[in-house]
Amino acid sequence: MKTYSAKPLEVERKWYLIDAENQTLGRLAVIIADILRGKNKPQYTPNVDTGDFVVVVNAEKIVVSGKKETDKMYYHHTGYLGGLKSESFKDLMAKNPVKPLEKAVRGMLQHNTLGDNQFNKLKVYAGPNHPHEAQKPIKYEFKGETK
């Protein structure tokens, strides 16, 4: 018996709607990354983008455990000498509540063009509204995976 390998044209894509309200950041990011990569499908192939689209709403209501709200830091470098900038989780949520979830999911995907294509299928919104009603997203049901 031959090993099945998915072809890019054979992949059927679905749209999933995930409500991030009161969900833990890291646990939710794992679920989203798995859906984006296609690991929830039987025809998963590591070198082919078999994943689905994910729409996340209520990203502003995401939670972290322990003291991470004040202690967790996000870093980026400007490119200049001494240009290391840092920002706490709380400050980043106040400024742009979508960024922490996007950064967590991006860190769990491959860091190449395949990962870029998978990440582009993620749509995150701070509030409960989103412009993807025409795609008829399926509401994702959590099976005791988070919290």
Image: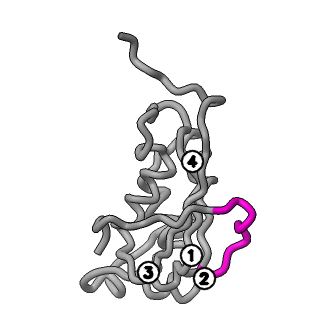
Start-end of magenta stretch: 126-136
Residue 10 falls inside the magenta stretch: no
Q: Earlier in the sequence, mark 4 or mark 1?
A: 1
Residue bearing the label numbered 3: 62
Q: CA distance from mark 2 to mark 1?
A: 5 Å
Image position, residue 62 (x, y; %)? 43, 80
Q: Earlier in the sequence, mark 3 or mark 1?
A: 1
Q: Is residue 84 visible?
A: no
Residue bearing the label numbered 1: 57
Q: Earlier in the sequence, mark 4 or mark 3?
A: 3
Residue bearing the label numbered 4: 118
Q: Main secondary structure of the magenta part?
A: loop
Pointer 3 local density, CA inside 10 Å: few below 14, some 14–19, many at least 20: many
Q: At x 28% / y 68%, what residue is drawn?
A: 144
Q: Which amino acid, by three-letter code, is at mark 2?
A: Pro
Q: CA distance from mark 3 to mark 2?
A: 13 Å
Q: Are marks 2 and 1 in contact (CB under 8 Å)?
A: yes
Q: Quadrant of the N terminus?
A: top left
Q: Which mark is residue 146?
A: none
Name the image quarter holding residue 54: bottom right
Q: Which mark is residue 128?
A: 2
